[in-house]
Image (cartoon, helix red, strand yellow):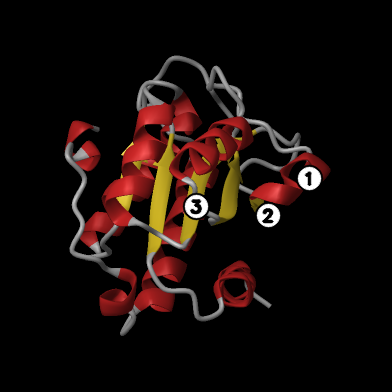
Amino acid sequence: MTEEYELLSKLKEVLGVHSRVAIVCVGKDLRGDDAVGPYTCRELLKKGLKNVVVCEDDIITCFYETITNYKPLTIILIDAVDLSLKPGTIVITSLEDIEEVGMSTSTHNLPIRTVVELIKTLVGVDLKILVIGIQASNLDLTQQISDEVIKSANTIVKTLTTLTEGLNSRWSTTHKTTTNRADNT
């Protein structure tokens, strides 16, 4: 089985028939492989996916705006991770299982789970959060993303594009973010 097929199968299993999905890509363009989030966001937007947001700096505000503006039932969170795996390895887990996987992102002041749980409480929604992590190789101050990480990001883009073909109208809403974060990358 190819990595793409495995990813597609896992996404189909987790998402099922959920509607109103937002994709949140986290990272910083100047932190090597941590730029995989913004890179993935730009590529998804080029493919015509809607409800895709990049969070580079203020993660709390970004998640809050995403939840209040798009009103998703499911959020797919894409970020670079450090699990001491082979660079470019893709890991998929639910937000609830994130500690079991041992996933941590090294570029955020607060753990993603803490941020999302806080916002879910403030907004009063029960969201399903799916985390797609890509094992980083280099988080130094550089604009270069490693080849392995780019390859994995492209696999995710292709997989999400395949999964959403014909579903874009179901995944889309008329809500727009007040700030177009994808243009700020």
- Report x, y in % for residue 32: 45, 26
Whole-Å distance between the Cαs marked 2 and 1?
8 Å
Q: Is residue 168 above or below residue 152?
A: below
Instruction: Give the label, 2 or 3, closer to the camera.
Output: 3
Q: Which residue is mark 2?
A: 93
> SS at mark 3?
loop
Proximity of marks 2 and 1: CB atoms separated by less than 8 Å: yes
> SS at mark 2?
strand
Q: Where's the N terminus, which quadrant?
A: bottom right
Q: Is residue 160 left or right of residue 121?
A: left
**Upstream in sequence: badge 2 or badge 1:** 2
Q: Which residue is mark 3?
A: 125
- Report x, y in % for residue 73: 46, 63
Q: Amino acid at mark 3?
A: Val
Q: Amino acid at mark 1?
A: Val
> SS at mark 1?
helix
Proximity of marks 3 and 1: CB atoms separated by less than 8 Å: no
Whole-Å distance between the Cαs marked 2 and 3?
20 Å
Q: Which residue is mark 1?
A: 101
Q: Residue at x 45, y 46 (%)?
A: 150
